[in-house]
Amino acid sequence: MSALTGDLRAPRCSSMEGRRAPGPVPGEQSDRASVARSGSMTSSGAISPRRILVVDDEPHIARIVQLKLPAGQYEVEACHDGAQALERLRRPDRFDIILLDIMMPRMSGLDVLASIRSLPHHSDTPVIMLTAKGQETDRSRATSLGVSDFLTKPFSPKKLLARIEDLLGS
């Protein structure tokens, strides 16, 4: 069914790779040392970018994250609801960090977080809650489920990058 006739199927998760705006981001370092610090080395010695999954029903959030992270150091993939994210996370490949909204259709971010912690290859993956919902009850539940950090929307891209780098040990 086309979008004009009201396709209600959920969109698939999408890779943001190759969708970077042209030109450097202000303050971005492009030397190999900075890539080595934030990326990970493959067995051949090549540097591969850190993988980030953004789970948010607002597509522009993933785009903002992708545009504000240093080029070549991070690969961003986006899912627009919790069910899609869990389907994606059940595949054997790993993400280095997950950015997760709380309020989403079909499944809350807190329910997604609980499910992520039950997946063997993502049980210890750092998760940052990016949310407009910052009530203490949400923070408390997320903490009990193993969230790594919280950022309230609107968020500062610099603060997000600092928290990502801190959690990844960059």
Image: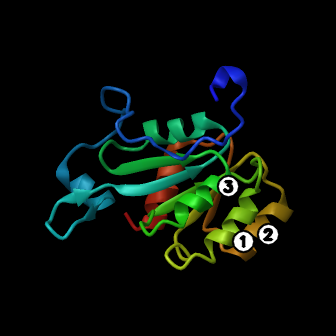
Label 1: which secondary element: helix
- Tell me: residue 107, above or below residue 64: below
Residue 147, x across and y down, in percent: 65, 68
User: For the view shown, which residue lies furthest in the left direction?
Assistant: 44
- Residue 94 horizontal side relative to residue 43, left or right: right
The colour style of the image is: rainbow
Whether pointer 3 and pointer 1 mark residues with C-beta atoms closer than 8 Å, the reply is no
- Tell me: residue 124, above or below residue 39: below
Label 2: which secondary element: helix
Q: Amino acid at mark 2?
A: Ser
User: Along the polypeptide, which appears first: circle 3 or circle 1?
Assistant: 3
Q: Residue 100 got which mark?
A: none
Q: Amino acid at mark 3?
A: Gly
Cα separation, mark 1 vs mark 2, equals 5 Å
Whether pointer 2 and pointer 3 mark residues with C-beta atoms closer than 8 Å, the reply is no
Q: Amino acid at mark 1?
A: Thr
> Viewer-proximal residue, 156 or 72?
72
Whether pointer 1 and pointer 2 mark residues with C-beta atoms closer than 8 Å, the reply is yes
Cα separation, mark 2 vs mark 3, equals 20 Å
- Mark 1 sits on what residue? 143
Q: Residue at x 31, y 31 (%)?
A: 24
- Mark 2 sits on what residue? 140
> Viewer-proximal residue, 35 or 115?
115
Residue 140, x across and y down, in percent: 79, 69
Q: Residue 82 got which mark?
A: 3
Label 3: which secondary element: helix
Q: Residue at x 47, y 48 (%)?
A: 77
Q: Residue at x 75, y 45 (%)?
A: 132
